Image: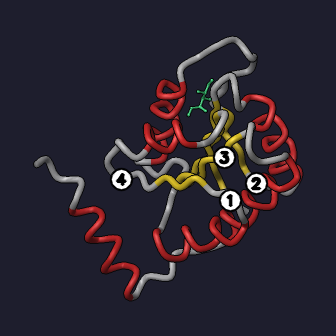
Amino acid sequence: MTALAIAADHAGVALKAELVTELRKLGHEVNDLGPDSTASVDYPDFATKLTALVTRGAPPLGILVCGTGIGMSIAANKVKGIRAAVCRTEFEARATRQHNDANVLCLGQRVTGGGVALEIAKAFLAASFEGGRHQTRVDKVKALEVDR
Ligand code: RB5
């Protein structure tokens, strides 16, 4: 089973709660970073909390939920060492782990229903980076992180 962190904004808090419950039932170790209510918050604040842990590898994977998943992914991808992907399908979730070594899955509560989101999260957590030619490409992505 996998250790992961999860966080949301007010527009993703309901889907986050559903995922926390279901992923824990499946045996995953889930660190829920909040929020716990639908009071308005700013998604970059929660992306920052989660990416601070994931960049240290503690835990190595994260899930961020906002209204669309897009704001969270934009914020998370500003952080060195983070490769965040918005996924709408299980195929994308599996492929972004295998090919991009994505370490953060972003979901949109206003876009993806709970049942589908859970299957996407399961696919993301079950897949592994394939390395090889993908390592070369990920290394080139990492090289873009230097200050220019
Ligand atoms: C909040 O209304 C919404 O803008 C946010 O959750 C997210 O969808 C941004 O990308």
Decide if residue 93 is on the left or right side of residue 130. Answer: right
For discs 4 and 2, the disc positioned in front in the rendered view: 4
Q: Residue furthest front?
A: 111
Q: Quadrant of residue 18?
A: top right
Residue at 63% x, 26% y: name it.
9
> Mark 1 and mark 3: span between their CA atoms?
18 Å
For discs 4 and 3, the disc positioned in front in the rendered view: 3
Decide if residue 109 is on the left or right side of residue 49. Answer: right
**Is 39 above or below relative to 98?**
above
Q: Residue furthest top?
A: 39
Decide if residue 42 is on the left or right side of residue 55. Answer: right
Q: Amino acid at mark 3?
A: Leu
Q: Determine the secondary structure under disc 4.
A: loop
Q: Amino acid at mark 1?
A: Thr
Q: Earlier in the sequence, mark 4 or mark 2?
A: 2
To which residue does mark 2 refer?
28
Q: Determine the secondary structure under disc 3.
A: strand
Q: Determine the secondary structure under disc 2.
A: loop
Mark 1 and mark 2 in contact? Answer it, CB < 8 Å.
Answer: yes
To which residue does mark 1 refer?
2
Residue 110, image x, y percentages: 74, 37
Residue 103, image x, y percentages: 51, 57
> Mark 1 and mark 2: span between their CA atoms?
5 Å
Residue at 60% x, 48% y: name it.
106
To which residue does mark 3 refer?
107
Q: Amino acid at mark 2?
A: His
Q: Earlier in the sequence, mark 2 or mark 3?
A: 2
Dot 4 surroundings within 10 Å: few (below 14), some, or many (20 or more)?
A: some
Mark 2 and mark 3 in contact? Answer it, CB < 8 Å.
Answer: no
